Amino acid sequence: MPDLIFDAHLDLSMNAMEWNRDFTQPVMSIREREKGMHDLPDRSNGTVSLPEMRKGNIGICVGTMIARYVKPESKLHGWNSQEQAWAQTQGQLAWYKAMEDKGEMIQVNNTKTLKSHLKKWQKENKKDLPVGYILSLEGADSIVNMKYLEKNYENGLRAIGPAHYGPGVYAYGTDSEGGIGKKGKELLKEMERLNIILDATHLCDQSFWEALKNFKGHVWASHNNCRALVPHNRQFSDEQIKVLIERGAVIGGAFDAWMLKPNWVRGKSTPKSDGVFISTVIDHIDHVCQIAGNSLHSGIGTDLDGAFGTEQSPADLDTIADLQKIPSILKKRGYSEKDIDNIMYKNWIRFLENAWK
């Protein structure tokens, strides 16, 4: 078992607040409670809980807040004003704070708290340790103005992905096309001033290139796979991956099946029948390593329970604890112990140490 696993993308608070999941309970208890529910495709198929993370040695993660602003004509789920989106994220933040009060989680937001958490996680008995989280915002629509950005920073926000799906207030995301505009440039300028990490995940191509041109701070991609293996705008092209590597980014391999194998059909395809396994995620991680010529820019950013469960996860993954299967797969492909540690957690740790020094 690796010393530690760092998962760079988990929508924990969204699951807790919008889907009413008590992540302090075992995964099997959450599944049992959801039997007979049909409002979401992954009901009773969830893979994540805090006890399961401890079991799998996933001691630190990037935990998101997410709330999209949508115009009346939009078919995307979201909120009808930026103020409503802000309030939704603050409810999600309150959940993280409640988890801290209960001793279930602990916020990591600077070098001191990072080192302290890592030191505690070296203990053999981890079942009672809090899971560390770096607070991130997936889609920046809830930032009503830059004063709200400062409020979020004061509450521990350390990374932002400017867009999610569709057109956003500050950038364009997956399945849309457009640039960052005046508001996007203002957001990036303030992020740079506050030393907030830019998460390039979900940016459409035009917004991606404009964001990297206008932002001189630290950039990562928390959960993104490779367009060379799955041709869709949600994935990164080799050209984008090369630029991210040049900027010192780490790219987290995501576990959503439609991002792993071409021609996945939601509701029809199944992980087993379509041959989606944890090794399929490793194909994408390996592709980034091959482009980089080393193991220093690949990591894990599962996005597990990000609107999908076991019905759309690798067939050999039952819960998040099965991330423990990754090292043996990497070893069979010729990766050294040092390489494996890089991918499992050290790349993300080094990135944060550099960003926060």
Image (spheres, helix red, strand yellow):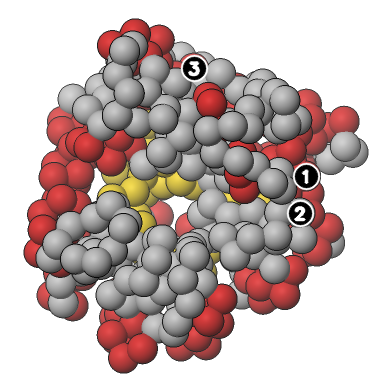
Q: Which residue is mark 3?
A: 55
Q: Residue at x 49, y 65 (%)?
A: 175
Residue density around tag 2, few if under 14, some if 14–19, many if 20 or more, within 10 Å: some
Residue density around tag 3, few if under 14, some if 14–19, many if 20 or more, within 10 Å: some
Question: Real-space Cα distance between discs 1 and 2?
Answer: 8 Å
Would you say the residues marked 1 and 2 are in contact, meaning their CB atoms lie under 8 Å apart? yes
Q: Earlier in the sequence, mark 3 or mark 1?
A: 3
Question: Real-space Cα distance between discs 3 and 2?
Answer: 32 Å
Amino acid at the residue labelled 2:
Leu
Q: As drawn, is 271 to the left or to the right of 43?
A: right
Tell me the element at label 2: loop
Q: Which residue is mark 2?
A: 229
Q: Earlier in the sequence, mark 1 or mark 2?
A: 2
| Residue 116 screen position, x and y as percent | 38, 41
Q: Residue at x 26, y 59 (%)?
A: 68
Q: Residue at x 31, y 13 (%)?
A: 36
Image height of 222 relative to 38, above or below: below
Q: Earlier in the sequence, mark 3 or mark 2?
A: 3
